[in-house]
Amino acid sequence: MVAFPEVSKIQYEGPDSKNPLAFRYYNPDEVVEGKTMKEHLRFSCAFWHTMRMNGADPFGAPTMLRPWDDGSDSIENAQKRVRVFFEFLEKTGLQYYAFHDRDVAPEGKTFAESCKNLDEVVKIFKEESERTGITMLWGTANLFGNPRFMHGAATSCNADAFAYAAAQVKKALEVSMELKAQGYTFWGGREGYQCIWNTNMKRETEHLAAFMHMAVDYAKEIGFTGQFYFEPKPKEPTKHQYDFDCAACINFLRAYGLDKDVKMNIETNHATLAGHNVEHEMEYAASQGFLGSVDANAGDMLLGWDTDQFPTDVYMTTKMMYVLLKYGGFTTGGLNFDAKVRRESFEPLDLFYAHIGGMDAFAKGLKNAAAMRASGEFDALLKERYASWDSGVGAEIEAGKHTFKTLFDYMMNKGEITPNASGRQELVENMFNRFMF
Ligand code: XUL
Ligand code: CO
């Protein structure tokens, strides 16, 4: 069966191409800063959006036209989706994929049946992965959709919900290992709370830590060497998610001794919901040694929720790629398009336009960022701005040679300080624009 007969493998045609089914910037084997674009960008596709998002919203019914999907919960239908998924990945040149256990296989009447269903579908993933060489970026478990997780999973007031979630993650780790996943992501779908009066916050956060420790321990036990990620999101579905932003997550990981085993999976739209932007979150995580992977998408600043749109803003992708290059690039992580086509873009072809656009936006961002770095202008500006730390008292403070007492004496002698050079924000923003056009 061919699901997308009108599309053949998407090719790079260069910036002048007007072909909507071609790349204008993403040239997989082109070398940028010593690595191919493919090696830098490590594009991944989210099964939950691309294969399962049906276009329903709180006001209306599904809209998506997916001729290969009979809409049933049968194993055959689930297996067929996987074949279609790989046709899509191959044609777009996406090298990786990610899924939640419940995206790919239907829940059974019992936990045992759900595990069996998952195995039936994972078989096809394995086959297709071996055929194509396309592998799993990270695995995860859906611990938020089923009503049993209404109060959360690891942070539920119901100990059985914790136990169920643990059993589910155990299985998801085994599946991830079988599919050679390079990582495993925790996104705490309902790990948070709505009302402080009915919530024992201390107990809930301790349970979350215990849960993550169990996952890390089990991974070690079975020899799963993938990187664990924690994905911040400040709200939605709960009002206060415990994984608010990178700073909150990293504090949690350090407080509970998980900092050696877990890094961050940063999502653009989650960053903006937290009142940050994605380059801030990436810079913060990377500077603390926690940059793991990126859920690449975009929000709409006029809407207050997680719209999960495809990223096309090259200003944003350039800033993201600048941080990535600065910190040496991805190792296990990648750019996972946690993004969905709009409800009105209901035809299968829209899935191609969406991913091509996202891939091109990052490829162009990568090239811009590399050019910025090659110019040395931004480094020079930073060097000059912080020059007072390179010699004299600045260098001495950094070397640990001072105390409040010695600095008191220093100021008594000096009397007053002279302002540093201008911050030059307007200049540097103009400089940035030069690389955009
Ligand atoms: C939800 C979200 C998730 C995680 C994986 O906002 O981003 O899809 O990426 O559970
Ligand atoms: Co995400």
Image: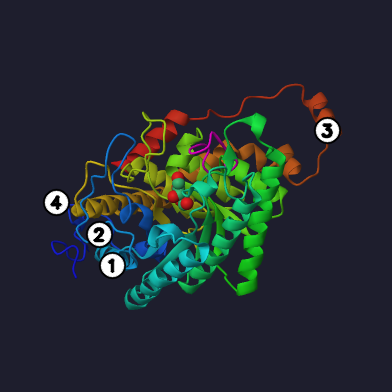
Disc 4 is placed on an element classified as: loop
Specify which label sits upstream in the sequence, 3 or 2: 2
Residue 85 position (above or below residue 187): below
Question: Label for residue 358?
Answer: none
Q: Do the residues labelled 4 and 1 touch (CB within 8 Å)?
A: no
Q: Are marks 4 and 3 in contact (CB under 8 Å)?
A: no
| Residue tagged 2 | 69
Specify which label sits upstream in the sequence, 4 or 3: 4
Mark 4–mark 3 Cα distance, whole angstroms, equals: 64 Å
Specify which label sits upstream in the sequence, 3 or 1: 1
- Asked if residue 266 shows in the view, the reply is yes
| Residue tagged 1 | 80
Disc 3 is placed on an element classified as: helix
Q: Quadrant of the C terminus?
A: top left
Question: Label for residue 18?
Answer: 4
Mark 3–mark 1 Cα distance, whole angstroms, equals: 69 Å
| Residue tagged 3 | 404
Mark 4–mark 2 Cα distance, whole angstroms, equals: 32 Å
402 lies left or right of 97:
right
The amino acid pointed to by label 1 is Lys
The amino acid pointed to by label 2 is Asp
Mark 4 Cα shell of 10 Å, populated few (<14), some (14-19), many (≥20): few
The amino acid pointed to by label 3 is Phe
Specify which label sits upstream in the sequence, 1 or 2: 2
- Disc 3 Cβ-to-ligand 2 distance below 8 Å: no
Q: Do the residues labelled 3 and 1 touch (CB within 8 Å)?
A: no
Which residues are drawn in magenta? Answer: 232-243
Front tag of 4 and 3 = 4
